[in-house]
Amino acid sequence: MEQRGQINISFLSTSFPRFDGDFSGNFVYRYAQELCNQGVKLEIIAPDDPASVPLSENFNVVRFPYFYPLSWQKLAYRSGIINRTTLLAWSQLPFLLINFFLTALKSSRKTQLVHAFWSASGLIAIAIRWFKSRPVVVTLWGSDKLIAQIPILSNLIFLILKKADAIICEDNNLKSLLVSRGFNPEKIFLISNGIDLKLFQPRDSAETKKNLGLDSEQNIILSTGSLNKTKNHSLLIDAFAELTASNESWHLYIIGEGEERLNLEKQIIESEISKKVKLLGIKNHNSLSQWLNAADIFVLPSQNEGTPNALLEAMACGLPVIASKVGGVPELIQNNIEGLLFDRNSKEELVEKLNRLIQDKELQNTLGMAAAKKVNSHYNSWEKQAEKLLSIYQRILSSQTN
């Protein structure tokens, strides 16, 4: 029997959009929107950031500060907690965890269930349950697999996360890892990210180029994602630099913002390709859809991923894609069928894949059509995915009252 009536939920996340167009934790934001549309009352707990501005939504967002002066807060956002390397960033970890716990504990007094996104938030959620009897759901993503590479720490973290009432994974690759580490498969649920198929769909390329003020004769390679080391845009820039001399009409555009921007700009200048490569910064979803439809090839060079929405959106627009063979990407793309895969960090292989697509317009069309078909047949809207999530909440809460 499922729980009826309005459900109050606390979302805990180490990343949440700080402004319109921010990629940080965007999928958490989309779930929050759809769950509220389905009658759930939500409060979001996330770290503060100097770039944060208020969001006009029908859910409450509580951003907790964790270091002073606020402009020195360096641990959350950007490359993510697991990828931080500076002493200043890691010295802030105890303060972040303490303030995260206290803020989330206060929120839990008003809610029936705590849903944590990423493993760090999951640890906070489990700790809250020791003080407040609240069921816990944890969503783990591709970046959480990095924890498995830390021998002693991973054993402790996984031991704690096993106490969750449900674990949500976005791909079988991550589910298999968790089962191999002793998680109960009956408590693991597969829910991939949603996608707005009304917005992200094939449109006339010439028309979208005109709308964006681009030369209709220009050929475009596009990549989207936060400008951090994990997204590996430097590899793409290196690969493009090798191709540009023999492919005069081709340009590379990268959408996103992040701490690697200055390094990437320096790399572009030193490679003498400033006229061919542009960092476009943040784009909202409507603009992003136009850029995807104006592009000819999409590249995802990440060192680590789950099932990235950036890739889903590009495929839904009918773009031929080249992606690194990491995380859940091989579940989404069969090599040479829905796209081309390459070994991460292999510039030579990426150059070969790019050159192959650039020279073969028929292959571009074939891969693009297969990609759009795959996304439309296998992936649901955010609304549908939120319904699956709500069903899990209802099942857990009902079992608590029986």
Image (tube, helix red, strand yellow):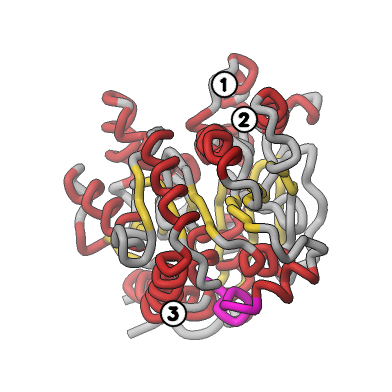
Q: Are marks 1 and 2 in contact (CB under 8 Å)?
A: yes
Three-letter code, disc 2: Leu
Element type where label 3 sits in the image: helix
Element type where label 1 sits in the image: helix
Residue found 46% across the figure and 48% down from its top? 354
Q: Earlier in the sequence, mark 3 or mark 2?
A: 2
Which quadrant of the rendered structure holds the N terminus?
A: bottom left
Residue found 67% across the figure and 47% down from its top? 256
Which quarter of the picture shows residue 39?
Answer: bottom right
Q: Position of residue 300 (x, y in %)?
A: 49, 49
Task: From the viewer's perspective, tell me whether residue 105 is left or right of residue 159.
Answer: right
In the depicted structure, whether residue 118 falls above or below residue 201: above
Q: Are marks 3 and 2 in contact (CB under 8 Å)?
A: no
Badge nearest the viewer, 3 or 2: 3
What residue does disc 2 label?
75
Which quadrant of the rendered structure holds the C terminus?
A: bottom left
Element type where label 2 sits in the image: loop
What residue does disc 3 label?
376
Q: Nearer the viewer, residue 271 or 180?
A: 271
Badge nearest the viewer, 3 or 1: 3
Q: Calculate the distance from the C-alpha at mark 1 to the C-alpha at mark 2.
A: 7 Å
Task: From the viewer's perspective, tell me whether residue 299 is left or right of residue 86.
Answer: left
What residue does disc 1 label?
90
Start and end of the magenta stretch?
Answer: 194-204
The 10 Å Cα crowd at callout 1, few under 14, some 14 to 19, many 20 or more, is: some
Q: Position of residue 140 (x, y in %)?
A: 40, 51
